[in-house]
Image (tube, rainbow, N blue to C red):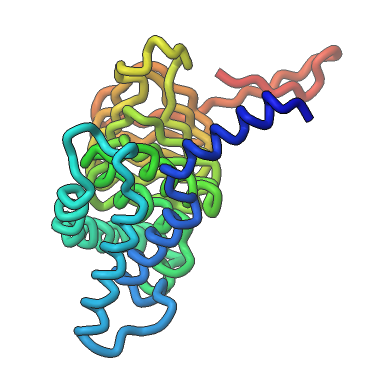
Amino acid sequence: MDHTFIKHIYSTHQECTQCPSSKAIERFFVDLLGVFFPNFASSPVESLSELENRVNILKREMENILYKNLLDEGKSPQETIEHFFEALPDIYYKLQKDVEATYEGDPAAHSKEEIIRAYPGFYAIAAYRIAHELATLGVKTVPRLITEHAHSKTGIDIHPHAQIGEHFFIDHGTGIVIGETTIIGDHVKIYQGVTLGALSVDKADAKTKRHPTIEDNVIIYSGATILGGNTVIGRGSVVGGNVWLTRSVPAGSKIYYKVQMQNSKDHANTILSK
């Protein structure tokens, strides 16, 4: 192998010593879930001091993954860790509301414990809420690795910079995409295969709002695609399965996919949609 190429690869390994490993970030996320929810813990906590010790371990794990090159300039890891742990109660209570939303919205859910342990939608939302707080604090790369970990396990891709309100419910989940500049209100329900995306993928639009706004109390059924930064789905609307939307709809709208059957000699049983 060419020695110049070997030297190039070696230099990239030297630079990567500043990068936290994906495994370390994944472990931090899972350990944090284990503190929030006993179902994710490797073993149950038997005393208050043991729980406090696990929180201190989490802080050390976070310190290890927050190298200065992953933070915005001017912020220290300790300052970020302090702000993040102060935000944990708010994250926890938001997740409790997400569990409540799932329990109320899915007649197949037999208990809240079942939702926490078995529902991919809850796992993806938990990853998003933790990653979003880190992203808000200016942490680079780590938030995206947390949501990508959840994406790999659930098939649900939520960008950590998206803004999602309270009482959020994802049913089934696989195939959902929620883009970076998406804004979602409170009490929104989304089914599998929904895309909240951009009209184009032009790099020049990176700093513009490219993804839709979903107002409060909206339901979006499976396979629907809603695109564009100026697209607003008004509060209380229902978007049916497989709908393709690139423009706003007023509050209280009901949008459904229409299928027509065309019979002719040349096009027997052709299905058209509009």
Out of 129 and 269, give the one closest to the viewer: 129
Name the image quarter holding the N terminus.
Answer: top right
Out of 23 and 123, give the one closest to the viewer: 23
User: Looking at the image, which residue is at 35% across and 77% down?
Assistant: 38
Image height of 227 relative to 32, above or below? above
Report the side of 2 relative to 236 (left or right).
right
Image height of 72 relative to 143, above or below? above
Report the side of 11 relative to 110 (left or right).
right
User: Looking at the image, which residue is at 46% across and 61% down?
Assistant: 119
Report the side of 215 relative to 270 (left or right).
left
The image quarter in which residue 85 lies: bottom left
The image quarter in which residue 57 lies: bottom left
Query: Can you see residue 248?
Result: no
Can you give x and y, in whole percent of width and height, for residue 31 in the image? 38, 67
User: Looking at the image, which residue is at 47% across and 41% down?
Assistant: 157
Report the side of 231 relative to 17 (left or right).
left
Can you give x and y, in whole percent of width and height, for residue 111 in the image? 38, 74
Image height of 6 relative to 76, above or below? above
Out of 234 and 143, give the one closest to the viewer: 143
Name the image quarter holding the C terminus.
Answer: top right
User: Looking at the image, which residue is at 52% across and 52% down?
Assistant: 154
Query: Can you see residue 46?
Result: yes
Out of 150 and 234, give the one closest to the viewer: 150
Can you give x and y, in whole percent of width and height, for residue 50 in the image? 26, 83
Q: Tell how many labels.
A: 0
Of all residues, the one furthest to the right in this rendering is 265
Of all residues, the one furthest to the bottom in this rendering is 46
Can you give x and y, in whole percent of width and height, for residue 115 in the image? 41, 66
